């Protein structure tokens, strides 16, 4: 079987899922083109900005397709390329794409709300608080892991002999370091700084692109052509002046940027930089497919080559890594198959930009399918480009920390060399460019989402004070009826909630805060305060921590969030009298997988590693406790709804008779 056959079969599976399964889900959800979306209704110019679907797709795809569909398959292919591909394809079609589509659709139908607000409406206020704690914890894990990955990408280096380059080369900076496979000290090329400079240049040009496609209404294809030119210029500048700072300095630079951008209008940096960056990803995926097809033509695509990564390495990898294939592989490959982080993007930024309800399917379901295909390409490049020994040397060395980013880059470099007769160094550089820009993109989105979550927490916990709860255009005396509020963290969205929530929890008028208390509460409404809290939490967990330490708990908690998002979606569907099997079955499977992994990590790793792994142990225990509470509340609400339905049924039959 060749790489080309694997690619074609994978494309067919993903195409069939989008062609037949996605429309079926759309009919069950009841999607309609004539409903006004929150972006069109509110259009505040900051968070709610109705935007053409290709631009929103670019933002959403760039946000979800960061390091996840690359690093996850790199770490997990040790269990064998067969299990990895099967999980990516089946998980992508029946779990991940369904999760993303449903999360986006629900967020649009519920007025641009995120998962926590939907949980409050369909499970209860306590579920809102628990879900809020869980989501903030997950977002901090995402930010910490991707911040560390970005710094790792900046400083990634590879032996010149592996790049098939001489010591006099001038393309990269050179340093002396141990070889990843042999351990001998040799001359290495630093390949990460070029991509870091590219990130800076693209960010600088982002406001211009946003102004042209949104304010001046330039055609998308013209802006795309300009974006490609900016990407090319950024790479050229990166080659001329690669970034050469320490990992700690780079982390501080990125932290300063996301702190600044988290409260600016979404089109100014976040949306527009994603739009530019995604062209590197689009072109990079085309490059990977062409290189793999070339490898198949030139005889390098035979999967069964001696010494290559095996189809099934399930039991041996489980023994070496001390984690069995189930649940470990299923949580390591998160973003390529199913990812809870996607529901945060869907309910945080994406739903506030869609100008049509039908766009939820195009952005949510099809965006996930494209991400799954990216993960397939990554697996194929690892199969073609690296032997099992080389893979182990880069990704799981015995004496020092592995580098999944470098593993991917070297696999792409050798694949391009086999398939396109391109120098290994150029393909490796292209892989770094493909990856690093999207690390910062995901960080940018995640910090903004964390800010939303923190602000919604303040609005709930301090909702009895007038600073956070003010009935819009009505007297407090009328607050016994549902009132319209503007909750902080929703970008000025009008939210219809029960009176007690709006009036301090007991139906009374909001309390007027005075003195230092009023100053403190008003301070909590400034975006930079809440962005600062998010950045501080990210640095606390991510400063000096290897992403490999965070990746397992990130993957498990990420998959757990996907399961909980599907649980909330199931409650929503039941309340609206719709079919639930396509969300309930994936929810049950992901609950079993993620909870098993979290318990295993706690018992086998974090508690024995106390106190060095105390933060991870505490996070693990917190996530397990919060999950138990949410599931108990959902079950109680389900039983209550059933009891109410059973009580109403005899009355209805009696009335009909």
Image: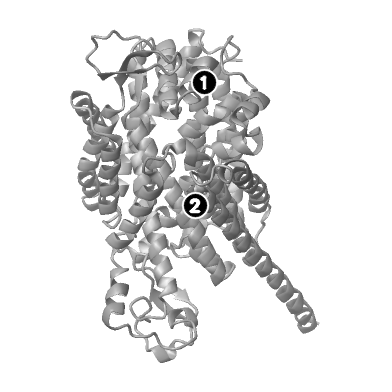
Label 1 environment density (alpha carbons within 10 Å; few <14, some 14–19, many ≥20): some
**Residue toward you, 357 or 472:** 472
Q: Secondary structure at mark 1?
A: helix
Name the residue that disc number 1 marks: 392
**Residue toward you, 573 or 490:** 490
On screen, residue 653 versus residue 182, left or right, reads: right
**Residue toward you, 195 or 422:** 195
Name the residue that disc number 2 marks: 343
Q: Position of residue 84 (x, y in %)?
A: 59, 30
Q: In the rendered view, tell whether residue 85 sits above or below residue 113.
A: above
Q: Position of residue 3 (x, y in %)?
A: 54, 18
**Residue toward you, 169 or 636:** 169
Whether residue 45 is visible here, answered yes or no, is no
Residue drawn 63% across and 21% down?
311
Q: Position of residue 423 (x, y in %)?
A: 34, 12
Residue drawn 23% across and 30% down?
244
Whether residue 151 is visible here, answered yes or no, is yes
Residue drawn 53% across and 68% down?
120
Quarter where residue 121 is shown: bottom right
- Of the numbered discs 1 and 2, the one sitting upstream in the chain is 2
Q: Position of residue 564 (x, y in %)?
A: 58, 55
Q: Secondary structure at mark 2?
A: helix
């Amino acid at each position: 079987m060749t790489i080309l056959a694997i690619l074609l079969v994978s494309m067919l599976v993903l195409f069939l899922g989008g062609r037949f399964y996605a429309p079926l889900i759309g009919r069950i959800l009841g999607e309609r083109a004539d409903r006004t979306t929150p972006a069109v209704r509110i259009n505040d110019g900051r968070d709610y900005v109705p935007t053409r679907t290709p631009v929103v797709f670019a933002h959403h795809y760039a946000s979800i397709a960061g390091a996840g569909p690359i690093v996850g398959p790199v770490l997990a292919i040790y269990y064998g390329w067969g299990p990895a591909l099967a999980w990516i394809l089946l998980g992508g079609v029946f779990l991940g794409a369904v999760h993303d589509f449903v999360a986006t659709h629900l967020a649009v139908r519920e007025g641009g709300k995120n998962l926590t607000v939907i949980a409050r409406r369909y499970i209860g206020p306590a579920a809102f608080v628990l879900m809020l704690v869980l989501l903030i914890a997950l977002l901090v894990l995402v930010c910490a892991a991707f911040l560390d990955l970005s710094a790792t990408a900046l400083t990634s280096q590879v032996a010149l002999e592996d790049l098939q380059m001489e010591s006099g080369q001038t393309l990269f900076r050179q340093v002396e370091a141990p070889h990843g496979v042999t351990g001998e000290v040799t001359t290495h090329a630093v390949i990460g700084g070029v991509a870091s400079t590219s990130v800076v240049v693209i960010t600088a040009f982002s406001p211009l692109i946003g102004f042209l496609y949104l304010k001046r209404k330039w055609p998308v294809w013209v802006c795309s052509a300009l974006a490609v030119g900016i990407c090319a210029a950024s790479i050229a500048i990166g080659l001329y002046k690669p970034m050469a700072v320490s990992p700690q300095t780079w982390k501080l630079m990125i932290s300063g940027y996301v702190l600044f951008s988290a409260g600016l209008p979404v089109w100014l940096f976040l949306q527009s930089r994603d739009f530019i960056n995604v062209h590197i990803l689009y072109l990079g995926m085309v490059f990977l497919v062409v290189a793999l097809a070339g490898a198949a033509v030139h005889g390098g695509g035979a999967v069964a080559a001696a010494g290559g990564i095996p189809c099934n390495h399930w039991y041996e990898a489980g023994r070496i890594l001390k984690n069995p294939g189930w649940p470990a592989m299923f949580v390591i490959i998160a973003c390529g198959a199913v990812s809870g982080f996607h529901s945060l993007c869907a309910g945080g930024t994406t739903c506030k930009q869609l100008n049509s309800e039908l766009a939820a399917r195009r952005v949510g379901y099809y965006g996930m399918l494209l991400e799954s295909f990216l993960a397939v390409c990554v697996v194929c490049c690892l199969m073609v480009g690296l032997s099992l020994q080389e893979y182990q040397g880069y990704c799981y060395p015995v004496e020092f920390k592995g580098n999944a980013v470098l593993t991917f880059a070297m696999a792409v470099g050798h694949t391009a060399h086999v398939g396109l007769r391109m120098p290994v160094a150029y393909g490796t550089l292209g892989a770094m460019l493909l990856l690093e820009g999207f690390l910062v993109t995901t960080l940018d989105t995640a910090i903004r989402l964390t800010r939303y979550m923190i602000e919604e927490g303040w609005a709930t916990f301090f909702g009895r004070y007038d600073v956070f709860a003010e009935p819009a255009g009505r007297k407090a005396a009328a607050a016994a009826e549902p009132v319209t509020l503007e909750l902080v963290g929703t970008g000025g969205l009008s939210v219809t909630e029960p009176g007690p929530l709006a009036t301090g929890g007991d139906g009374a008028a909001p309390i007027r805060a005075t003195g230092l208390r009023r100053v403190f509460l008003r301070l909590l409404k400034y975006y930079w305060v809440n962005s600062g809290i998010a950045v501080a939490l990210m640095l606390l967990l991510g400063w000096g921590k290897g992403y490999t330490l965070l990746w397992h708990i990130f993957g498990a908690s990420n998959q757990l969030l996907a399961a909980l998002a599907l649980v909330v979606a199931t409650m929503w569907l039941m309340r609206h009298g719709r079919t639930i099997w396509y969300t309930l079955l994936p929810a049950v499977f992901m609950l079993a997988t993620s909870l098993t992994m979290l318990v295993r990590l706690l018992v086998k790793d974090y508690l024995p590693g106390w106190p060095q792994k105390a933060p991870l142990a505490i996070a693990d225990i917190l996530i397990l406790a919060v999950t138990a509470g949410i599931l108990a509340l959902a079950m109680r609400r389900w039983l209550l709804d059933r009891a109410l339905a059973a009580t109403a049924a005899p009355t209805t039959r009696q009335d009909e008779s």
